[in-house]
């Protein structure tokens, strides 16, 4: 799974940093701490789906049939909060993503996964040179079996299916830098992870996209 995260990161970030100058190759200690608040979803189309699937996930039959470390997120509001010291973006994710990947040397992001390795989250930033949101949106659409897509203003969302794995990414693009997150999880556990997407989307803050880093 570590190799899988690295491959995802390389694919997404390689298109961003080519031709751009990195100004900071250090990786200070990330600001990771527990928080007791779960924010509400902000993407309407995903929100409607999450509401219906979340209700199903809470039914006794579904909970009995689905054994997953993330089940306790249905009963607990404990999240972790991450702030990237280089690009300044922040995001919350369930504390059940408790296995932390080694951060890249240039400090551009982070990766976490569930103990069973079935689900992964990465969040990253990059300097974008002269590329705009449409460029990154089109890149996200390439070479994927896209099941959902939307682009408005300076942000985009793309979801795809790769065999038995669902992927979901959201990117926010500024004048000189961008931030994005990616989550991948088993198709069979979609009801559980739609709730996680709501948390990621609602808490993803990108105050530094107007600056180069």
Image: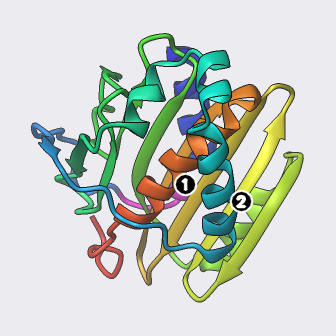
Magenta range is 14-21
Q: Is residue 71 left or right of residue 91?
A: right
Residue 132 in percent (x, y) is at: 60, 80
Circle 1/circle 2 CB separation < 8 Å: no
* x, y percent for residue 173: 50, 75
- Circle 1 Cα neighbour tier, 10 Å, few/some/many (<14 / 14–19 / ≥20): few
Residue in the picture at 55% in, 46% down: 182
Pointer 2 local density, CA inside 10 Å: few below 14, some 14–19, many at least 20: many
Q: Residue furthest top?
A: 116
Q: Is residue 152 magenta?
A: no
Residue at 79% across, 47% down: 160
User: In which quadrant will I find the C terminus?
Assistant: bottom left
Viewer-side residue, 126 vs 53: 53
Classify mark 1: helix, strand or loop.
loop
Q: Is residue 114 visible?
A: yes
Q: Quadrant of the N terminus?
A: top right
Give the camera-side residue of 158 and 67.
67
Q: Tell me, yes or no, if residue 32 can be seen here.
A: no
Q: Is residue 123 left or right of residue 197?
A: left
Q: Is residue 209 left or right of residue 66?
A: left
Q: Quadrant of residue 207?
A: bottom left
Q: Is residue 7 above or below residue 156?
A: above
Of mark 1 and mark 2, the one earlier in the sequence is: 1
Q: Is residue 18 magenta?
A: yes
Q: Which mark is residue 18?
A: 1
Q: Which residue is mark 2?
A: 158
* Residue 126, image quadrant: bottom left
Q: Which mark is residue 38?
A: none
Q: Position of residue 99 (x, y in %)?
A: 34, 19
Residue 12 x, y percent position in the rendering? 60, 47
Q: Is residue 130 above or below residue 37?
A: below
Residue 200 occupies which quadrant of the picture? bottom left
């Amino acid at each position: 799974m570590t190799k899988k995260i690295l491959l995802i990161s390389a694919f997404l970030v390689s298109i961003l940093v080519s031709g751009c100058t990195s100004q900071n190759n250090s990786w200070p200690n990330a600001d990771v701490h527990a928080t007791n608040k779960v924010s509400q979803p902000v993407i309407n189309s995903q929100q409607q789906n999450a509401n219906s699937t979340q209700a199903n996930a809470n039914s006794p039959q579904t909970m009995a049939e689905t054994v997953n470390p993330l089940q306790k997120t249905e009963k607990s509001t404990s999240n972790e909060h991450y702030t990237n010291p280089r690009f300044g973006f922040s995001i919350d994710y369930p504390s059940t993503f408790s296995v932390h990947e080694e951060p890249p040397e240039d400090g551009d992001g982070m990766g976490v996964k569930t103990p069973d390795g079935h689900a992964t989250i990465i969040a990253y930033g990059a300097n974008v040179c002269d590329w705009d949101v449409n460029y990154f949106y089109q890149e996200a659409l390439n070479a994927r079996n896209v099941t959902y897509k939307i682009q408005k203003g300076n942000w985009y969302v793309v979801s795809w299916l790769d065999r038995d794995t669902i992927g979901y990414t959201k990117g926010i693009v500024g004048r000189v830098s961008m931030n994005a997150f990616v989550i991948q999880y088993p198709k069979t556990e979609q009801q559980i992870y739609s709730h996680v997407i709501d948390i990621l989307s609602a808490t993803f803050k990108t105050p530094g996209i107007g600056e180069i880093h």
